[in-house]
Image (cartoon, rainbow, N blue to C red):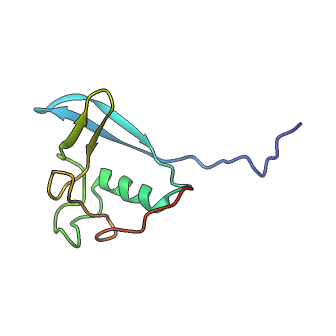
Amino acid sequence: MGVDTELVKTHVRPRCFMDVAVDNILLGRIVFELFDDFCPLTCENFRALCTGEKGLGKTTGKPLHFQGVIFHRVVKSFMVQCGDFSTGNGTGGESIFGGTFPGINLT
């Protein structure tokens, strides 16, 4: 047995982070590894929303970034949801591409 070097990936996936605070008290940092080799549009959208580098949204007119966004859904011992920078309740948001973009099928 050997290793087929053509099959060995050398791609390093990008990472980004969110600092989480309550009442301006830093609680910690969440680091995300982005699987841009599987879903490049989704990853680029998320990365740019973390950095805030894309300015204002074309459809919402709101800043395209996660800074100051609240966790609009918290399920104890399971998960949190956040990212709705336009309405703050999980019903809004916008991609860096303007509005929405096609989903991906990983099946």
Query: Which residue is found at the position 31% from the left and 50% from the top?
Result: 50
Query: Which residue is found at the position 31% from the left and 33% from the top?
Result: 29
Tell me if 55 is positioned left or right of 101 in this view: left
Across and down, in percent, residue 82 comes to: 25, 46
Query: Which residue is found at the position 54% from the left and 56% from the top?
Result: 106
Q: Is residue 43 above or below residue 32?
A: below
Across and down, in percent, residue 59 comes to: 21, 72
Q: Of 69 and 17, which appears nearest the observer? A: 69
Specify the quadrant of the image occupied by residue 65: bottom left
Query: Which residue is found at the position 68% from the left and 48% from the top?
Result: 9
Across and down, in percent, residue 22 comes to: 15, 32
Locate the N terminus and report the quarter of the image it occupies: top right
Q: Residue furthest left?
A: 23
Locate the C terminus and report the quarter of the image it occupies: bottom right
Q: Is residue 19 above or below residue 66?
A: above
| Numbered disc total | 0
Q: Residue furthest right?
A: 1
Q: Of 62 and 79, which appears nearest the observer? A: 79
Q: Is residue 54 above or below residue 7?
A: below
Specify the quadrant of the image occupied by residue 3: top right
Q: Of 75 and 13, which appears nearest the observer? A: 75
Across and down, in percent, residue 68 comes to: 17, 46
Tell me if 30 is positioned left or right of 1 in this view: left
